Image (cartoon, grey):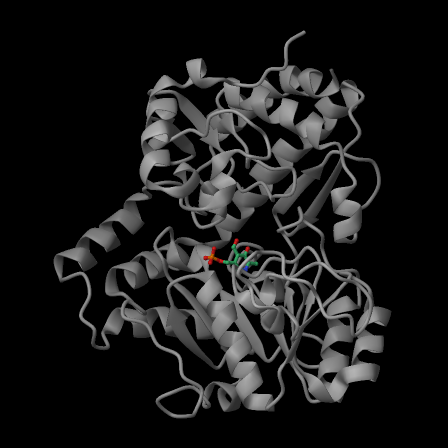
Amino acid sequence: QPLPVQTAEDAPASAALLARASQVIPGGVNSPVRAFRAVGGTPRFMASGSGPWLTDADGKRYVDLICSWGPMILGHAHPDVLAAVNHAAAQGFSFGTPSENEVRLAEEIVARVEPVEQVRLVNSGTEATMSAIRLARGFTGRDVIVKFAGCYHGHVDALLASAGSGIATFALPDSAGVPRSSAGETIVLPYNDLSAVEAAFAERGHEIAAVITEAAPGNMGVVPPDPGFTEGLLRLTKQHGALLVSDEVMTGFRCSASGFYGLEGPYAAGAPDLFTFGKVMGGGFPTAAFGGRADVMALLAPQGPVYQAGTLSGNPVASAAGLATLQGCTPAVYERLDTVAHAIADAVANELTAASVPHTIQWAGSMFSVFFRDGAVTSYDEAKDQDTAAFRRFFHSMLGQGVHLPPSAFEAWFVSASHDDEAVEHVIGALPTAARAAAT
Ligand code: PLP
């Protein structure tokens, strides 16, 4: 039986666009995971999105389970967000001066996440984590950053390291072009391993500016923190005068109205000192934020000595889109996300079980991912130990049947509140064939 890998003939318009794109854009894409390298085949070039549906350049429709990697929590082109964007855009696109929309978005974030007293708006999650790290270094006067293997915090030099293990082992950069000196200030530890963090602090506590962690990792698939892990990080950072940066770029305003913090916090050992946000808070527009303790944020320019800036930061149209999205995230929306996610995940589990395909589904709130292996996944090493070839067959069968999954076995699946019963039934209807494909 041939592999159900979609070929250029299945998507001629996308294939033609990819050929054109490849002439002028490296690899034909502006962000690597879009290129389908992990699954093979032709990435679909989308022409439009509406609610839970995407339509590609060939006019083929897909139920979208990427949701722009998180931001489209209300679905594509939601009427309220569209109205807010149209209204804001009609007033002008960017002023290079302060404006009220950015104040309103900042107020909304501060009101939702209790430990966040101030925020600075930026243009991407990468900028948010980069700036949070600079601020933590400026505040502590220390250089070393601790991160966890399998956690992604954007393409910041110092955070693009996941190689190396063991305490005080300087990590090797994951990407060419990252100076050894930059990655050399980063200690990479296994996720959910508090004793490794304890050992790192015992050895180099006086050098560590911050520990940065995804509030609940979603970038190696969904691997929630073990009970007590976040508490332990808080205890150790506070004991040693380091900051804890909780990266909620993916989980923020998705796992709950106040992010993963809203599910797991408040903590007995105190609160993370800094948070980073992105995705949902921009509603599909390029805006993100970092924020936290007022005494730490006070170090930012123009008040303090830590420089940070942006021509388009706090953009009025992006801020309006983000604000309308956050305001649209009602309790009913979170309820619907939960219902949709569980309906899809239960059906995936049933069909993979029926086809005897090993799998494990893991959760952080309504965020979930499917690992093609048996047994719980608590770390990156375990996440990597799965049948990616089975995922590839599953992915292409779903794609062929009009369901667009994230094109990698190491990603969370994202749903929106606009995923109605028709969209959910469409996904469920595609699963038996895809599960059988995965099994072959
Ligand atoms: N942090 C986390 C947890 C993320 O998931 C991402 C992106 O996927 C980032 C940071 C980087 O955000 P951006 O892609 O907006 O730069």
Pick whichever, 171 or 194, lies toward us.
Answer: 171
Viewer-proximal residue, 127 or 37?
A: 37
The N terminus, quarter of image: top right
Number of disc labels: 0
Q: Which image quarter holds the C terminus?
A: top right
x then y, percent, for residue 257? 52, 60
Instruction: Tell me residue 40's x, y (percent).
Output: 56, 27
Q: Is residue 181 left or right of residue 231?
A: left
**Residue 377, can we see it?**
no
Q: Decide which of 56, 334 is in the foreground and name it.
A: 56
User: Which quadrant holds residue 304?
Assistant: bottom left
Task: Say whether residue 65 is visible.
Answer: yes
Residue located 48% across and 27% down the image: 423
Nearest to the observer: residue 125 or residue 170: 170
Q: Report x, y in % for residue 336.
A: 52, 43
Q: Is residue 391 above or below residue 277?
A: above
Q: Residue furthest top?
A: 1
In this rendering, the answer to whether 424 lies above or below 198 is: above
Question: Does 22 sit above or below residue 144?
Answer: above
Which of the 4 quarters of the picture holds residue 204? bottom right
Residue 288: give x, y in percent of width and height: 42, 64
